[in-house]
Image: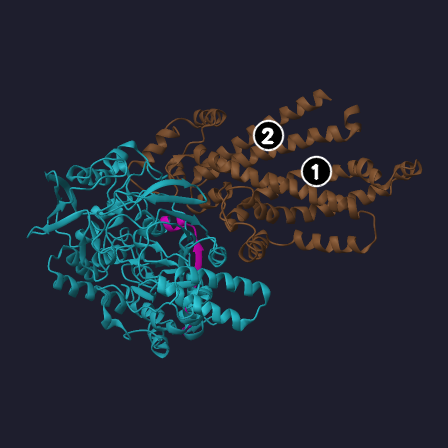
Chain colours: A brown, B cyan
Amino acid sequence: MWSRIISRLFTSLVVAWASVTATFVALHALPGRIQDILAGDLEYPGLREAIAAEWGLNRTLPEQYLDFLFRIFRGDFGTSYVLRQPVIEVVGSQLLPTVELALTAGVLAVVIAGGIALLTAGRSNFSREVASVLELVFASTPVFWLGILLLMAFSFNLRWFPVSGAEGWKSIVLPSITLALPTAGLLTQVLREAMEKTLDQPFVTTVRARGVGEFIIRWRHVLRHALLPAVTLGGWLIGGLLGGAVITEKVFGRPGLGTVTLGAVLTHDVPVVLTVVLLAAFIHVAASTLLDILYVLIDPRLRAQ
Amino acid sequence: MFDAPATRALKKYVQVMRMKNNSLLVNGIAVALLGIGAAQAADQPISGGALTWGVTTEPSCFDPHRSSQQAAFFVARNYIDSLIAKKTDGTFAPWLATEWSISADGKEYTYKLREDVVFHDGEKFDAVAVKANFDFIFKPENAATAVSLLQTFDHAEVVSPYVVKLVLSKPDSSFLESTSNVKLGLISPKALEKGDLCGGGRALAGTGPFIFEGYTRGQSAVFVRNPAYKWGPGNAAHEGPAYLDRVTFRFLPEYAVRTGALTSGQVDLIEGVQPTDAPLFAEQPDFKLLTGPSGASTSFTFNINYTRPPADDVRVRRALRDGFDLEPIVKQVYLGTVPRAWSIIGPANPAYNKALVGSWGNDIAGANKLLDEAGWTGRDSEGFRTKDGKRLSIEVGYPQPYVRDNRDILIQGVQASLRKNVGLDLNLRLITAGEYAKNNANGTWTIYPNTDNPSDPARELWDMLGSKGFLYANISNPDPEITRQIDEALASTDPVRKRELTDAVQKRGVDQAFIVPLFAPSWFLAAKSTVNGLSFEAGLDSPSSAYDFWIAKK
């Protein structure tokens, strides 16, 4: 089991290295001079020269590549010339609010999906029908619209929650629900289908014959089997949460990576965009590594091999 | 009619009645009475209180020397003062300078400074500080965007501790106005030395009525009252420190969210109200709506690159100008909240050429005749005019970051009319700022939709039509007539002659259809009825700083 985990960690490092390399290649494959690309829409005397010096553009390509690798390794992501600040400061200060939002929304989505799937799987009653219609609606509702609707109901009219900002627990309630519902909608459907398939398995009949209660069957045995396809969705889930956070942050006027990314794309702030791309790649790699290790823990068959 | 406790009691009564029964009549009467009570209380300014202001755009840089965002400047006005202040009639009032004089040759500007001014970081404000600011902006390696206002600046001299002389390399009639501009506002020399001030905070020490307390990216910027402030501008409503203890700017980019935040009382004031939301605030007892003048900035205009075919033919440009009825399009998009434009300069600006009103536009028969004469006589399968098999098509390249308040919808309206009326394909394309920058550098832009930042009228005309302005700097053969008129207006020290020239430029610009004015944008403010002292600043063509704002007791 340990060799399996270690080899998985090693492949992750290779993927992370490949993504840094891909970023470097992409930057150099763009038409135009590197200093023009990195400058964004800015234009003032001395800027191009300063960029050339910082990125060592007068050196050979392999040297620049090694330098780039080491800089990323050291956590030096360069300077945002548009914002006139080190990129790591800009992105670093915005990372926490986004992680907070994505994490809360992720947990919320999993809880909602797990709860509904446990309650409604394999039961051909009214609540299952209602739940599945709601799931479809939420899975296909744009985050933007959902956010405005929630704001109208709970902030503008009932005034339970503030409209914007990131201060105190109250300000995270509406954004995290907004972000969680579409994810929960899809996750519930996947989870329930997997549970219903498992419920038809002969071993469930065996367990039932032993006189185990319905809830224990579902919670201890069926859910564990059904988790595998849901965990596979995990990578997609993290991507969805990060992408959705961009829009959610804009609607709710929250600080975060989304706000920074949107601004950077619009002003052609390439150093910031590059850093966000790299960060997204690292998060994906880290998450899928973690999920793969989780598989091993969930599924004893993988441990035995 | 009602004292404060009575008003409070009435409010309570309204709340109770609202909970108990939803009788429209009861609500209506009580709310009307409340309105009268509020009007009574609104006489005397009161010190104290905090105000939250929901704004559309988060400035990417708070340093006025380095910013180029219109949306950043009115925020900066809260902590940055200038040498002089521009009044709505186009003249100037004292501010940090009590007197100023211009030498006979128009090349030396001398300012006598107040002697009691202190920067937020405790540094003394004097002639040395003023010189330090101008030197800082003028140095290329400091990369200050405000350097565009120092085209003719040569050097600054400290005449005595409180007299500073700014010397130009040649006469520049726009320079006095420039020294009232927030971009050339004064920052503590010690702060300037420290390096980058874009991130705001206490490091950004000006002399303004508010001190920059802190900035949370993506969320808000907070300013607190400067208790030492006694050097307010000559055009303000009061003297001494600001009334408010604290002003918070909240960045709320969504229209619907800003509106909801105000109606639910979570912010006190919003900027950027969608025309469809205006009735929620206008003439409502609990709210007020203010429409700003369109004074200092230019109209929203199509700037047609008259050196690029097919728009190098004046007949094509005039057909584009006259081939649609602008009035109903503007009315439909902005619901009558803004006027259509007739000239490049806005109607509330003293330099506006009124003679242009009614002089052009909506002549569809004439436009068709012009296009026939120009040889665009064929028609393709989609109904557009053609010549030698080529469609009559001109692209409007609109940089995405600058698209705001439904301006793209307005252009689509014009696009549809031109297609129907004269068979001209006005091709609106949203482009990136980078693509625009490239087109601009190569001089290959076609139609650029624009509102110019406020400055002196001659300087604005130079920006948009002058030989080295931002649009024509990279075009080798701009119209000699109009560029000569603009250069002369900039060098003119005689206000009457200058006025003749800026009038002539506006006339030629529209007559030759180098420019098609569309509408005169205004700022909209909506606020709780208790927020008083709201106004607009002529020099910025934007909401004023919060210096004169005060909140009435409920």
Type of the residue with mark 1: Thr
Q: Quadrant of residue A222?
A: top right
Type of the residue with mark 2: Val
Q: Residue visible at 17% across and 39% down?
A: B126
Instruction: State the CA–CA distance, disc 2 to disc 1.
Output: 18 Å
Q: Which residues are magenta?
A: B422-437
Q: Residue furthest bottom?
A: B365
**Quadrant showing the N terminus of chain A:** top right
Q: Pick whichever, B15 or A141, lies toward us.
A: B15
**Residue where numbered disc 1 is placed:** A232
Q: Pick whichever, A255 or A266, lies toward us.
A: A255
Q: Residue visible at 67% across and 46% down?
A: A184
Mark 2 and mark 1 lie on one chain; the one further toward the N terminus is 2
**Quadrant showing the C terminus of chain A:** top right
Q: Say whether mark 1 and mark 2 are on the same chain.
A: yes
Q: Tell me which chain the residue with mark 2 is part of.
A: A
